[in-house]
Amino acid sequence: MNQCALFQNLLPSIFSESKVKAVAEEQGYEDTARKFTVFQLLRYWTQAALEQWKGYRSGVDQASLSGLPTVHYSTFSGKAAEVPFAVFKTWFHQLLQSRGRAERRTLQIPQELLLIDSTTVTVGKTRLPWAPYHGERAGVKLHVAWDVTSGQPQHVEETTAVSHDGPLGEVLADPSYTLVQDRAYGKIERLDRYLEQKQGFVIRLKENVHLVTPRTLRQWNSENAPVKRDIICQLGTPACRFLKTASCGGF
């Protein structure tokens, strides 16, 4: 028995057919098929990902070698277009939660790393007319939070390809991890909030961010002076910066 056939034997222990059907109904999809059900579609999709099928037609030829029921490729493609994407997304997140890692690692110190990044998948614009990208291309973007220790995704969100990464950083953030992110997620306000929440993070800053150490000015000692500290701060980039000073005496 090859690895692919073994995987199909293990799949029912992860997701029973009744559980798969229940998830589909929660998302508003009623499965009326008798031969190629939603559960069979899930088996086909997982096998397609495992073996990296090139398409529907070639996929059904490989399916029988993995212990899957044989169907016409039009049945496969038709069912794939019919079942809402939200159904598969819900299954995937339930699979991640079933590992129970959140409960097992809540008190672990030091924190493990959670890598957050995105990847863009493009196709011809006629296939995804609701997600235009560039010219004749359309695309979607997958935002992934990757658990370094387990080598598995911890959370996944999808957007159109032109969506900015920044807002998804907060959705994928997990306080039980140390976040590792690219500069697209490095919003100053968000970093300040991470500091207040004691959220560990490693984020490459944008090129237009300048960190300046305040320089204390010389001032006279006066116990009755209302000014406790006198410093120079630099705001903005050098091209937009102007100089304005005031002594602790107000002139």
Image (cartoon, rainbow, N blue to C red):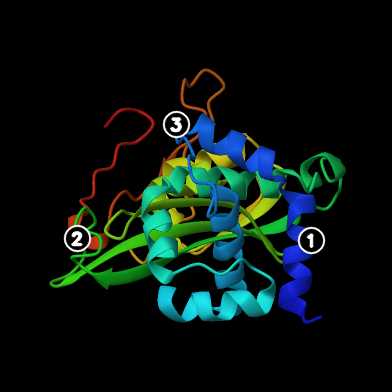
Quadrant where the N terminus sits is: bottom right
> Residue reaching furthest top?
224
Question: Within 10 angstroms of label 2, few (less than 14), some, or many (20 or more) residues?
Answer: many
Q: Which residue is mark 1?
A: 10
Q: Secondary structure at mark 3?
A: loop
Question: Within 10 angstroms of label 3, few (less than 14), some, or many (20 or more) residues?
Answer: few
Instruction: Estimate the x, y position of residue 204 in percent, counting from the top left.
Output: 50, 64
Of the image marks 3 and 2, the number of the one nearer the N terminus:
3
Residue at (72%, 65%) from the top-left corner?
8
Instruction: Estimate the x, y position of residue 31 in percent, counting from the top left.
Output: 49, 40
Residue at (75%, 44%) from the top-left corner?
98
Towards the viewer: 230 or 207: 207
Q: Which residue is mark 3?
A: 28
Of the image marks 1 and 3, the number of the one nearer the N terminus:
1
Marks 3 and 2: which is nearer the front? 3
Q: Secondary structure at mark 2?
A: loop
Marks 1 and 2: which is nearer the front? 1
Question: Within 10 angstroms of label 1, few (less than 14), some, or many (20 or more) residues?
Answer: few
User: Amino acid under label 3?
Assistant: Gly
Q: Which residue is mark 2?
A: 132
Left or right, 244 with respect to 58, comes to left
**Do labels 1 and 2 touch, CB within 8 Å?**
no
